């Protein structure tokens, strides 16, 4: 009986790992959306997956390879004078092709490649839980400071430079948080579900409510609730978790449509004009 | 640079991949509103950006008093389409206190940014800089998109400005510069 699986101790740690990651990825996703860098998340996740594959090829732990390649990608990115979607697109296709090409040279390469791209949440263990918990605590502790700097830089781009405030600590911490998000997400729930958790909650949450703090809270709630629904549905229907999680997140996009409709009706009633595009 | 000055530019040639303005020399003292006039493309905004470090300094020197704080109002601020920041959250980013906001923008403080017009957003950004605690405020075409009432508020705030604060005001509207600036210079490429 699949419904009993929900309460099986075997799934407790995977559920908690996913829950922590869902909250953390949604939170970091709000900063990436604020900085218009959400595509970087998919690029890093793909590069981390390729790193995991390199580590498997060398018979090492996946997380070491994932951290290594994602870290190298961020260092290279920081040396470029101007980074944009073209660079992130190159990271995505490079990571994807490297993952699958390396897999072709290994006995179980295809299985490992699929697990890195699509997720292997049910196989996560206590080290994953500890890593995810530490990362989430760090992300929560740094978030107010990172958000304050990111908001100021978004609207007053030269404020920190003009006041001779060091920018590198902020950039370094944000890069570390993003790399850790990509790595923990990729080795636990897969590159694409991680990207979905980084991208979708803030895409929906930023148009549902007014005010920065409220939109961050709503974004995290969307990520967590979609994750929990996906976990239950995947177990009950014996479906792979990664695609179910991604589908659940995409379905929350309907809330954007509802918001657009509500605002359009408000406009007809003489309220302020809507600007939501679905 | 004298001990009384907040900022001094000496023979500054600034630009991006190549020089676009200069040599320019100027000094800003507390209580002063220094105007920079000139035609479109003369390099007025580039001078402000060279002060904040966003434009390259090809030659000359930029000196500033120890600990001077700067707020820079950009000429064409980008209004993010789907960022539900409230007006008061934007207003407070540089340290301005929403409780003491000028009357004209109080109705805007509770609104999300996506419900502001271009002119309202420009006014909010301008006043966020002008009402912040920054000692030196760099204003780049602050009159753009503003209606008569907003211009009156801006004028009143500029007239109230006292030492130790100062403003460098870029505008192509000569009448506005003449009405509000204690000194002004013409900038050419």
Image (cartoon, rainbow, N blue to C red):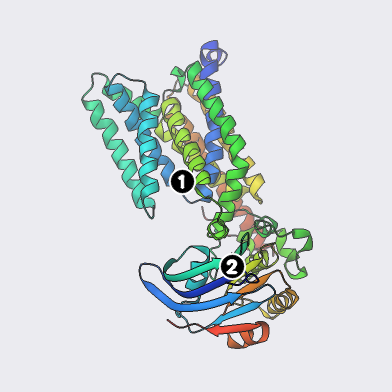
The reply to whether residue A69 is visible in this rendering is: yes
Can you tell which quarter of the image residue A110 is in? Answer: top left
Q: In the image shown, does A125 or B49 lie closer to the viewer?
A: B49
Q: Which mark is residue A10?
A: none
Q: Which residue is mark 1?
A: A38
Q: Quadrant of the N terminus of chain B?
A: bottom right
| Mark 2 crowd level (few <14, some 14–19, many ≥20, 10 Å Cα) | many
What is the C-alpha distance between the residues marked 1 and 2? 27 Å
Which secondary structure, mark 1?
helix
Task: Chain letter for mark 1, please.
Answer: A
Would you say the residues marked 1 and 2 are in contact, meaning their CB atoms lie under 8 Å apart?
A: no
Residue A73's spot in the image, x, y percent?
Answer: 36, 40
Residue A205's spot in the image, x, y percent?
Answer: 59, 45
Looking at the image, the residue that sits furthest to the left is A105
The reply to whether residue B82 is visible in this rendering is: no
Task: Chain letter for mark 2, please.
Answer: B
Q: Which residue is mark 2?
A: B73
Q: Residue at x 51, y 24 (%)?
A: A131
Q: Is residue A56 above or below residue B7?
A: above
Can you tell which quarter of the image residue A24 is in? Answer: top right
Q: Does residue A25 appear to the left or right of A58 in the view shown?
A: right
Residue A229's spot in the image, x, y percent?
Answer: 55, 28
């Amino acid at each position: 009986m699949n419904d009993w699986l929900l309460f099986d101790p075997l799934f407790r740690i995977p559920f908690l790992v996913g829950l922590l990651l869902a909250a953390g990825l949604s939170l970091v996703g709000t900063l990436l959306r604020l900085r218009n860098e959400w595509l970087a998340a998919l690029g890093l996740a793909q590069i981390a997956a390729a790193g995991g594959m390199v580590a498997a090829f060398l018979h090492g732990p996946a997380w070491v390879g994932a951290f290594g390649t994602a870290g190298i990608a961020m260092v290279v990115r920081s040396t470029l004078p101007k980074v944009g979607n073209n660079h992130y697109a190159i990271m995505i296709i490079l990571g994807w092709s490297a993952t699958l090409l390396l897999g072709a040279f290994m006995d179980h390469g295809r299985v490992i490649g699929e697990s890195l791209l699509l997720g292997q949440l049910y196989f996560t263990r206590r080290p994953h839980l500890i890593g995810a918990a530490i990362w989430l605590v760090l992300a929560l502790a740094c978030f107010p400071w990172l958000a304050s700097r990111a908001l100021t830089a978004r609207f007053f781009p030269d404020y920190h430079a003009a006041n001779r405030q060091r920018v590198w600590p902020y950039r370094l911490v944000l890069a570390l948080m993003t790399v850790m998000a990509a790595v923990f997400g990729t080795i636990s729930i897969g590159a694409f579900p991680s990207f979905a958790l980084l991208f979708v909650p803030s895409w929906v949450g930023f148009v549902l409510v007014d005010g920065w703090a409220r939109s961050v809270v709503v974004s995290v709630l969307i990520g967590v609730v979609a994750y929990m629904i996906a976990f239950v549905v995947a177990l009950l229907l014996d479906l792979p978790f990664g695609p179910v999680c991604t589908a659940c997140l995409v379905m929350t996009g309907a809330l954007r449509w509802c918001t657009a409709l509500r605002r359009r009706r408000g406009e007809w009633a003489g309220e302020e004009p809507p600007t939501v595009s679905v | 640079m004298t001990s009384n000055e907040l900022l001094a530019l000496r023979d500054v040639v600034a630009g991006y991949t190549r020089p676009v303005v200069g040599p320019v020399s100027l000094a800003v003292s507390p209580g002063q509103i220094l105007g920079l006039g000139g035609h479109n493309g003369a390099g007025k905004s580039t001078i402000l950006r060279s002060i904040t470090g966003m434009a390259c300094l090809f030659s000359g020197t930029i000196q500033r008093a120890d600990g001077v704080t700067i707020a820079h109002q950009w000429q064409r601020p980008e209004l993010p389409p789907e960022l539900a920041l409230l007006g008061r959250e934007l207003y407070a980013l540089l340290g301005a206190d929403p409780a003491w906001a000028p009357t004209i923008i109080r109705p805007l403080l509770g609104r999300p940014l996506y419900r502001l017009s271009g002119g309202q957003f420009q006014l909010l950004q301008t006043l966020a800089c002008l009402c912040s605690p920054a000692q030196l405020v760099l204003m780049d075409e602050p009159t753009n998109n503003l209606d008569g009432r907003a211009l009156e508020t801006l004028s009143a705030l500029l007239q109230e400005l006292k030492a130790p604060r100062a403003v460098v005001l870029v505008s192509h509207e000569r009448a506005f510069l003449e009405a509000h600036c204690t000194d002004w210079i013409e900038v050419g490429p």
